[in-house]
Image (tube, grey):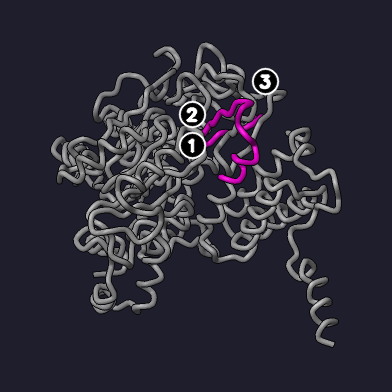
Amino acid sequence: MDRAHLLNILWECQRNYGHISDAAVSRISKKLNVADVEIEGVISFYHFFHKEPTGKHIIYLNNSIISDLKGYEAVKTAFEKETGCTLNEQGNDDFSLFDTSCIGMSDQEPAALIDFQPFTDLTPKKVKLIVDRLKNDENPKNFASKTKSKIQYHPEESKAVIFRPYAMGKSIKEGLKFTPEDIVNKISKSKLLGLGGAFFPVGYKWKSCMNNVADAKYIICNADEGEPGTFKDRALFQYLPGLVIEGMVLAGYATGAKEGIIYLRAEYQYFKNDLEALLSEFRKVNLLGTSILGKEGFDFDISIQLGAGSYVCGAASALIESMEGRRGEPPVRMWSATKHGFKHKPTVVNNVETLAYASRIVELGEEHFLSLGTEESPGTKLLSISGDVAKPGIYEVEFGTTIKDLLGIEMSQATSPYFIQVSGPSGECVNNSEFDRRICKEDIMCGGSFMVFNRTRDILNILRNYMEFFKKESCGVCTPCRAGNFILNEKVKKMQSGLSSQQDIDDIKKWGELIKLSSRCGLGKSSPNSLIYAMDKFKDYFNLKLSPNDDQNVEFDMEDAVQEYDSFIKDTQI
C-alpha cells in the first residue's frame, strides 16, 4: 500500500477510536514504510484529526464572520452549557466541542457539524433540543438539517447555463461526436476560466495535459471550497452532481486521462454516500468504466478522496500534496501539474463549478456560452450571497452584472449595504461609491463568495475575523505568511483597543505588501488584501479609530510603569 492511502487510513482510525493514538501511528508507519515523525506531521496539519481522545460526539461550531454576526456567541455559550465542555479544550466522555472555519453554510448561520452531520440556523433553544437528543442516544444523522441552499436567481432558460433542465449523459453523448482535440478547442474557444478563484484559462490547461505523453493521467475535481462565504460548489453537488461528473468524464476524454478523483472537503462528507451512489448509477449505464458508450479505448472512472480540514488545500499544488499523503503545504514548483502532477503524472485540477460549466459548454455549444457575459469573461457565474440580505442563497448571473443589481430588489434585497466583500476575505472589499462596478474580468472578478454587511456592522470586527482566519489557516512553511499574518492581526487588535496611530496604518500597508510579495502560495499573497483595501476605501472610519493623543499610542510598558517604584525601593535600601 502506497502513501497516497494515508488520509484514508487516518480517517479510519479517527472514526473507529475517536483519535489517532501513538500505537496507531506506529502501526501505520510500518504498514506504509513511512517514518513515525512524518505521520505525526500529517496528523497535526489537519483540523479534523485528533491525537487526544475525543467524546462520543464531536461538535464543530463554525466561527466565520457571518456566523459571528448571526449569533455565534450565544450558540457557543449554549453548547458549552448543555455539553459541559469548554470550547477547544479537552471534552468529556460524551462530547468534544471545537470551533472551525467556514463549513459552507453562510446562508444558514449559525451552523455546526455534529459527527459531521450539518445543523443550521442554530439558536440556544435549538442547541438544547439537539444535545438532549444526543444524550438520549439518537443518531444525529436522523435529525440533521436539510442543507440545500435556495436557488434565488438564474437567467431565463434561454440564457441560463447551469440551472436549466439536466438529462443524465447528454453532455457525454454530445462530446463523443467530436475528437478529443475538438473538445479542447471548444473549451478554448469558449474562453472558459477556472472558477475557483485563480481564473486560469481552462482550455490551455486541458491542452497542456493532452499534449504531455505519459502512461497515466489524472483529472482531479477540487471540491475543497474553503473560502469563507462560499457555498456554490456544495449547491452544485446537491442539485446537479451529474453535471460535475460529466465534466470530469469529458476532461478525461479530451486529455487521455483514465482516472478521476473528487477531492471532497471533510465538511461535506455528509453527502459522500449520495455521490458514491450516483457514480454507481453512471457505471450501470456505461457513462463510467471501460469503453464508455461503446467508444473503444475510452476508459474512465472516478473515486472520492476525503480531505481532513485545511483551507490551503484549496490550492491545486497543496491539494496534490495532500492526496499523496503529505502535509498540504504548497511546494516550490518547477513544473505545472499538467506535466508533473499527482504521482508525478500529467494532471488537470479543476474546481466543481468549472467542470459543471465545461459540461454545459459541450452540451449547448460554445457559441451559446459566448453569446452571454462580456468580451473577456463570457457566460454566467455562480455567486454565494450571504450576510445582511433578505434573500441569501445561490445566484447564477451573467458576467457583467453590477454590484448594484446584485444588491437590489430583483435579487438579494440587501438592507443598507455598506461594506461588501467580493471573493471572500482573500478578495476585495467594496464601499457604496463602487456599486456600479461589474462582476467580470474587465472590472472586479468574484470567485463565488459575496458577503454583504450593513452600517450597523463594525468593520474592525469583520477584519479581525478575517485575520484570525488567515493566521490559523497559514500552513506555516514560509515566514512572511506565518509571522506576517500574526503581526497584522495584532495591529487590528491594537486598533480595536483605541491605541493606534497613523504609523500603525502605514506599518500595516508595508507589512501587507511584504507578505504579498514574498509568500509562497495564494494564501499569503492574498491575505492582506481586505485589510489594505478597507483602510483605503473607508478612511473616515479608520480616522475615527486613531488615538487623538500621541501619548496614548503605545501599549502598556511594564518596565516603564514600575521604574519609579524600583528607584524608590533602591533609595530606601541605601
- Give the answer, above or below, for where 288 lies relative to 31: above
**Image-based side of 336 in relation to 59, left or right:** right
Kindly identify the residue that appears in the image at 31 percent across and 55 percent down: 96
Residue closer to the observer: 48 or 202: 48
Residue holding disc 3: 436
Residue closer to the observer: 324 or 145: 145
Q: Residue furthest bottom?
A: 574
Residue holding disc 2: 386
Q: As shown in the figure, which amino acid type bears the numbered disc 1? A: Gly
- Secondary structure beneath label 1: loop
Residue closer to the observer: 535 or 541: 541
- How would you rate the neighbour count of disc 1 (Cα within 10 Å): few for under 14, some for 14-19, many for 20 or more? many
The span picked out in magenta is 442-465
Q: Nearer the viewer, mark 3 or mark 1?
A: 1
Residue 455 visible to the viewer: yes
Residue holding disc 1: 229
- Give the answer, above or below, for where 188 lies relative to 315: above
Label 3 near label 2: C-beta < 8 Å? no
Residue 523: x %, y % from top left: 56, 52
Question: Is 461 covered by the magenta stretch?
Answer: yes
Q: As shown in the figure, which amino acid type bears the numbered disc 2? A: Ser
Q: Nearer the viewer, mark 2 or mark 3?
A: 2
- Secondary structure beneath label 3: loop
Question: Is 69 covered by the magenta stretch?
Answer: no
